[in-house]
Amino acid sequence: TTPVLFIVTPGSDPSQELEEHAERAMGRGRYHQLAMGQGQAEEAMRLLAECARTGDWLCLKNLHLVVAWLPTLEKEIYVLKAHEDFRLFLTSEPHAKFPSSLLEGSLKITYEAPPGLKRNVSRTYEAWSPQYISDGSPLRAKLLFLLAWFHAVVQERRAYVPQGWSKFYEFSFADLRSGADIINQACDGSADPQWSQLHGLLERAIYGGRGDSAYDIIVLRTYLRQFFSNEMTGGGGVRVKTLPGTDISLPNANDHGTFTALLRRLDEANSPSLFSLPVNVERTVQVTNSKHVITSLRTMASHGGTSKGFDRSAWSASLGPLLRSWDRMMA
């Protein structure tokens, strides 16, 4: 069986979507995943042998953390006598020492978080079915939209480092999914949510655990209090406010289409006002991206004379960051 290798960027993680797809295709309990790191090699080999025998699906995550062990994994893959239903998925960030033979022997897929707040929230609503949104009260539907918006904001602020965040944080789809579980529990009864409790869980149990700067924690806490409040949901008879940087206020509905229609009123490109940042921060981003493009071009030029032929993998690795930077500049 040919492994499927997801080449990911920091903060993007396809494993949650893989799990949902596996549940639809194979049934519950037929998908297994393991985040690689120190001491996980033996467990990975056990899962690989077991899933190959039973025909389950297996995802080994973060292979860039264990590149020294990958030749052992590769040998095991080649000698496997796998069930016809077995599928092996691998995820890794780009790494200079990733074995070229494993790279060439895999089906490669580049996986990135979609750029732009509008596309980010839209992608979340593509993952959430109409039934999932309508299976609850209008308050729950509002909170889910606010969660998707909040998740997109904290991810898109990473484009404005160091003004947005002090560093690049790996907020992922798993954080969004855990946040949705918390909201489902908060809306389980008839009473209004306890806002302080909701803020605390989202901060301490999920998003705040990634922050290591006092300034970033203050920003995160401010967002939580701003988005998850009566002012946004209209609870307690309070007048509903619009989302920052927009003219959008949340409707009292639990229909999937009603919320996705709101997104069509947004521009494709991000505006600093969406993140409560000054307008001139955009110039800083453009300068940073320009420097990155120039550095990439210089790196490619310095290696141009040493090439002994066309190497597709090397060109893909070199051009990928350059093209992504160019897309961000033109967005």
Image (spheres, rainbow, N blue to C red):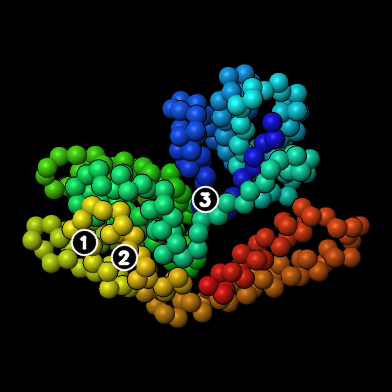
Residue with the mark numbered 3: 12
Residue 172 placement (x, y as % from top left): 46, 49
Residue displayed at 36% across by 46% down:
129
Q: Decide if residue 276 is in sight here.
A: no
Q: CA distance from mark 3 to mark 2?
A: 25 Å
Amino acid marked by disc 1 = Pro
User: For residue 100, which quarter of the picture?
Assistant: top right
Q: Crowdedness of circle 3 by 10 Å Cα count: few (<14), some, many (20+)?
A: some
Extreme residue toward the left, this view: 237
- First of labels 3, 2 by sequence position: 3
Residue 230, x across and y down, in percent = 16, 58
Residue 262 circle label: 2
Mark 2 burial class by Cα count in 10 Å: few <14, some 14-19, many 20+: some
Q: Amino acid at mark 2?
A: Leu
Look at mark 1 in the image and give the residue it sits on.
251
Left or right: 91 in relation to 232: right
Q: Is residue 154 above or below residue 5?
A: below
The spot of residue 125 in percent (x, y) is 38, 53
> Whole-Å distance between the Cαs marked 3 and 1?
30 Å
Quadrant of the snapshot with the N terminus: top right
Q: Nearer the viewer, mark 3 or mark 1?
A: 1
Which residue: 37% across, 70% down? 266
Instruction: Residue 263: name its quadrant.
Output: bottom left
Tell me: 173 left or right of 3.
left
Q: Residue 108: which numbered mark, if any? A: none
User: Where residue 235 sits: x, y (%)?
Assistant: 13, 57
